[in-house]
Every structure is written in structure tokens, then in C-alpha cells.
Amino acid sequence: MRRREFIAGLGSAAAWPLTAQAQQPIGTRYLRALSEIKRDYGKISHSTEAARSDYITRLVRLRKEAARGKTDAWQAIDAEIKQHAAPLESDSKAFSKLLVGKWESPRHDYLYRADGTWTMLPADPDTTHGTWRIEGNQYFDTAAIDPPETAQYTIILMTKRDFVFSDQEVVFYETRLK
């Protein structure tokens, strides 16, 4: 190893703890905000669906900020979000009506149609597509592949702006496109 490479390596190794330390306060800020939001929600003695929805919406906004800030705090926020599924007896028709339209996820855009079909955008014959349905707080997605695969997810939040659902391991976020 040449002297210059060795010194550069030492400089990088010496800078790494400082970089990690600089990141820590940012993540701590999101964890502190998470604790405050949880505390505020915990003060509500008889939580309504509107209060739960507001709570999850606040967590979703915080999670987006934490992910944008490239911290690991989003994992703690996801863990909290997963614990607050929409009620089992949720109105399937109301949720279905809200889902119809164009949505974006961090990776792809989707179009959900009123006839229970969906397609990844831009829509063309070779684009991934399938069918969907909602039963209570459960969202079912069947991809049109051979053989067809149906996935079941628990809806956490469904509003005009946000569609948040989980497969018990991962929380998925979609935002309505304008």
C-alpha cells in the first residue's frame, strides 16, 4: 500500500465517527418528536377514529421527514404505525371509493380503477397490473402473473391524500397524485 493511500484511509477512518456522531442528533430529534406525538395521543381517554386517523397522519408526515433525513428513526415510527390498524369493521365501500385514482409510492406510480383493477404507470400492455379489493380493513392485491399471486395487507390509514398499509413486516406508503 502506498503512503498516500494509507493516509487517505486513516483520514476516512478518523472522520467516520464524527460523521456518525453528527447524524445522531438528527435521528434523536425524530425519536423525540415520536415520543411527543405518542404522549399527546396517549392523553386521549376515549380515542375516536378521527383521533386515530390524525395520530397516524402525524406519524406519516414525521416518517417522511425522517426518511428524507436519512436517519434510522423511520424504523421506530413504522413500528408505532403498525400497531394502529384501521378498525376491523371499516367501511369497505368508503375505502374502495377513496382508493380509486392515481397514487405514487416511493418506487412506482399506480392507477386504481373503480372496476377493481390496478396498473403500474405508465400504463401499457406490458406494465405490471392486476386486481384489488377491500374487505373491512383488509386490502387484497392480486398481480396478473402466472400463477396469480394474491397478497393481503392491513389498512392502517386511508384518506383522500394517504394510503398506508402493512403486510405485518413492512409498512407501505402511497400518496395521491394530483
Image (spheres, grey):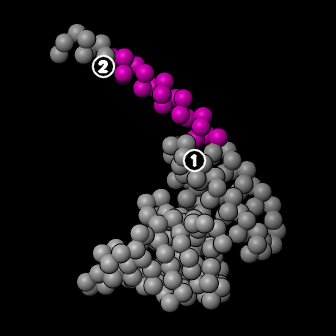
Neighbor class of circle 1 (other Cα within 10 Å; few <14, some 14-19, many 20+) is many
Residue name at image x 72 percent, y 69 percent: 52
Amino acid type indicated by mark 2: Gly
Q: Quadrant of the N terminus?
A: top left
**In terms of depth relative to the viewer, which is nearer, 147 or 161?**
161
Q: Nearer the viewer, residue 78 or 114?
A: 114
Q: Tell me, for residue 9, which label it has, or none.
A: 2
* Magenta stretch, residue numbers: 9-29
Residue 83 visible in the snapshot: no
Up-down relation of residue 129 to residue 33 (above or below): below
The circle on residue 66 is: 1
Secondary element at image label 1 = helix
Residue at figure coordinates x 54%, y 46% from the top left: 68
- 20 magenta-colored: yes
Q: Quadrant of residue 50?
A: bottom right
Picture residue at 67% right of the left edge, 44% below the top: 32
